[in-house]
Amino acid sequence: MNIIPNLSVDCVIFGVNSENLSVLLVERELTKDGEVLFSDHTLTGHHVIEGENTEDAAIRVLKSITGFENIYLEQFYTFSDTNRLGGKKDIIWRENFPHKIAEHVISVGYYSLVDSTAICPDEAHKNVHWFPIDNLPELGFDHKEIIEKALEQLRIKVMHEPVVFELLPEKFTISQLQKLSEAILGTTFDRRNFRKKVGQMKSIIALDEKQKGVAHKPAQIYIFSKDVYERTRKEKLIFFY
């Protein structure tokens, strides 16, 4: 396996549950002669292999970490600063890396959106952990900047397109939709106003069905229609705002 020494992908894997937004990080620890030289965290990523395009490289990285292939994936930015690997720890890491890589590495950033409760790294990835987006550990390289850029782009996408439905079950309640949207956007919506806005969206369709087996008053069940959304999307350019 020959890598391209100056081209890599970095994947910002965002994990969502009903309460918060997290990002999947890899613990990077470098040891020499039994001594730990340093330890921090990085995004999941890898150099592109010869004969491979960047999207295939990102899919490969995601599959190796999560075990899944059909994950929402979006390319969002290319990071090409000449000093990306210029930090003291990063220089030491590069000097001890098993493959020869360039001093100037260009990285194509991708973000994905997954249900964090459905992905638990296996025994082969004990050094991979979820971290809340507002409480990240020390990061290597320029990965703080990459995460911030990915988060900015994700939130723009969610505000304008129905990305949240990638994570909701086929049938859902307005409350589920609101909690998930708030978790991703890092904000809170007024319950009444949110329901009013959702009620104006023709693609969110109420079923003649309510929740079952709940202790509280059963809520109305809804579905999201991609077909209706595509036919009516010009009527409402902004999705939630």
Image (cartoon, helix red, strand yellow):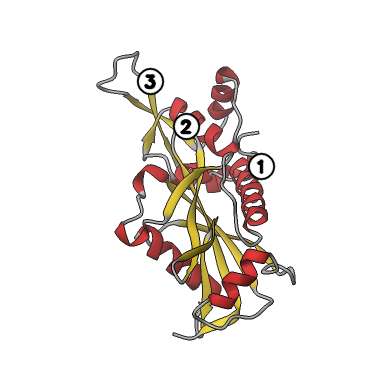
Is disc 1 in contact with disc 2, using a CB cutoff of under 8 Å? no
Residue type at mark 1 is Leu
Above or below for 129 versus 220:
below
**Residue 219, label in figure:** 3
Is disc 3 in contact with disc 2, using a CB cutoff of under 8 Å? no
Q: Earlier in the sequence, mark 3 or mark 1?
A: 3
Q: Earlier in the sequence, mark 1 or mark 2?
A: 2
Q: Could you tell me which residue is drawn at 38 percent across and 20 percent down?
A: 219
Q: Could you tell me which residue is drawn at 60 percent across and 59 percent down?
A: 140
Q: Could you tell me which secondary element the residue under label 1 belongs to?
A: loop
- Residue 37 position in % (x across, y down): 54, 64
> 136 or 81, which is in the foreground?
136
**Residue 19, label in figure:** 2
- Residue 82 position in % (x across, y down): 74, 72
Residue type at mark 3 is Ala
Label 1 and label 2: CA atoms lie apart by: 27 Å
Above or below for 137 versus 32:
above
